Amino acid sequence: MGETSRRLPVTLAPRTDELLSSWIGRHAEFYAVPPLAMLRHCLPEASSLRAADLDLNEDQVFRLARMFSADQTMVHRMTFANIAQSSRRLIAKEPVQSCSRCHPAKHDPRPVLRSQLFGWRITCTLCGCLLRHSGRHDRQLLSAATMGLLS
Ligand SMILES: [Zn+2]
């Protein structure tokens, strides 16, 4: 399979609490490929970035960690694996809120933090500030219509 050749020559450091799909997305941007192509470069069987955030088995975590020359525990922590199955349906499909201190508007490409998809969170996991809700309705429709990446 030539798995070792899949190790990326350049990798980007994840932000604190960054979501796995966001991190993969920033690599995709860096390598100028679609985010799903970046994911499938490592996991050809992956159906979507959303699925990768929600459900990775141990082998998949291992392969991702190897491709990104990262620590498996760290990759695991970037997913929603620690969220109870019954709560996962409440995880938004895209960021619904942000912290004005930790998510500066000017950041390109802008990392998405796990907590931004937790509509039930009121305060920022990093600094404790109140989170601001962002214009979610339009953006949810947009993402559902255009991305096709969300299962
Ligand atoms: Zn914050």
Image (tube, rainbow, N blue to C red):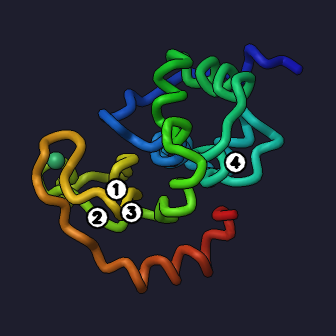
Side (left or right) of 51 relative to 84? right
Q: Does the beta carbon at disc 2 come under 8 Å from ligand 1?
A: no
Category of crowding for the residue at label 4, using alpha-carbon neighbours closer than 10 angstroms: few (below 14), some (14–19), many (at least 20)? some
In this figure, which residue is indicated by the disc labeled 1? 116
Which secondary structure lies at badge 1? helix
Which quarter of the image is occupied by the C terminus? bottom right
x, y percent for residue 21: 53, 46
In this figure, which residue is indicated by the disc labeled 4? 37
Between discs 1 and 3, the one toward the N terminus: 3
Q: Residue at x 42, y 30 (%)?
A: 12
Q: Do callouts 2 and 3 mark residues in contact (Cβ within 8 Å)?
A: yes
Category of crowding for the residue at label 1, using alpha-carbon neighbours closer than 10 angstroms: few (below 14), some (14–19), many (at least 20)? many
Between discs 2 and 1, the one toward the N terminus: 2
Q: Do callouts 4 and 1 mark residues in contact (Cβ within 8 Å)?
A: no
Closer to us: 150 or 33 = 150
Which secondary structure lies at badge 3? loop
Front position among marks 4 and 1 = 1
Residue type at mark 4 is Ala
Q: Does the beta carbon at disc 4 come under 8 Å from ligand 1?
A: no
* Whether residue 17 is visible: yes
Separation (CA) of disc 1 from disc 3 = 5 Å
Q: Do callouts 1 and 3 mark residues in contact (Cβ within 8 Å)?
A: yes
Give the residue at the far right of this rendering.
1
Separation (CA) of disc 2 from disc 1 = 5 Å
Residue type at mark 2 is Gln
Q: Do callouts 2 and 1 mark residues in contact (Cβ within 8 Å)?
A: yes
Separation (CA) of disc 3 from disc 4 = 22 Å
Label at residue 97: 2
Label at residue 95: 3
Between discs 4 and 1, the one toward the N terminus: 4
